[in-house]
Amino acid sequence: MPNTPRAARDARPLTFTEQARRAQFVGLTIRVIAEHGYAGCSLQRIADAAGVTKAAVLYHFASKAALVRAAYEEVIGQLTADVGALVEQAAGPAQAVEAYVRGLTGHLAAHPDHVRVIVEALDGDTAITDRPASPSRWQALAALIEAAKESGAYRRDIDSRVLAIVLGGAIDGLIAESLQDTAFDVVAAADALVDLLRRSTG
């Protein structure tokens, strides 16, 4: 099958200008979803926010779903990078678990627009396979907990999967509360969660 103009563009490296334009559209998509939800996000609304035509958006992204997927990947990429950096700097396995808990909570609290994208993108027809119940949501934390068990920092009888799921649910609850109440002290709440973690694992 002959290459379409889009296929030909996708097959070559993006120019600096194209990368910058795509990044702009992704950033605007995050903002539009945060303000209007997935249903209220349209290519025309994104084009208007960028001050360009809808055709200009379609030059870079074939559909709304493709653009929302790119926004979702950007949000998850930033989250993973920030939390991963904190975990790598931890002094030991137990501290790595605590860094994960504090890092994930802090990042989501500091980026409420990203939280809305994570929630809204999964409700739309975006073909995003990630789901709240996906194993990928707890596996990374479970691996850190398992390492803490092997080091002797945590009790050997702890179920890493269960604890990871419980901590994930607690973090979701803290973030939901912070979105409802801007005066809610997320840092103090994360400290309290870490204190509970220490009491239950030592």
Image: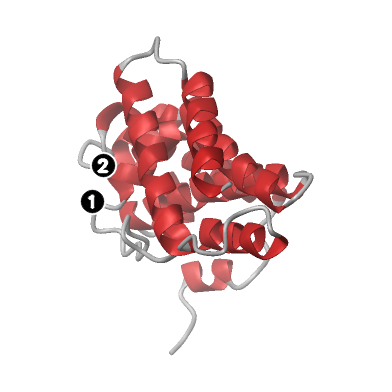
- Tell me the amino acid under the disc marked 1: Asp
Residue at the disc numbered 1: 123
Q: Quadrant of the N terminus?
A: bottom left
Q: Residue furthest top?
A: 183
Label 1: element kind: loop
Count residues near mark 1 (Cα–Cα under 10 Å), then give few for <14, some for 14-19, many for 20+.
Answer: some
For the point 51% across and 29% down, the residue is: 190
Residue 17 seen anywhere in this rendered image of the structure: no
Count residues near mark 2 (Cα–Cα under 10 Å), then give few for <14, some for 14-19, many for 20+.
Answer: many
For the point 31% across and 60% down, the residue is: 133
Mark 2 or mark 1: name the one nearer the start of the chain: 2
For the point 38% across and 13% down, the residue is: 182
Label 2: element kind: loop
Display coloring: secondary structure
Residue 134 seen anywhere in this rendered image of the structure: yes
**Where in the figure is residue 58, as x and y percent of width and height?**
40, 52
| In the foreground, 155 or 130 | 155
Q: Is residue 31 left or right of residue 36?
A: right
Residue at the disc numbered 2: 38
| Count of number-bearing discs | 2
- Tell me the amino acid under the disc marked 2: Tyr
Q: CA distance from mark 2 to mark 1?
A: 8 Å
Point out which mark residue 110 bears: none
Q: Residue furthest bottom?
A: 1
In the rendered structure, are the residues bearing label 2 and label 1 in contact, judged by CB atoms less than 8 Å apart? yes
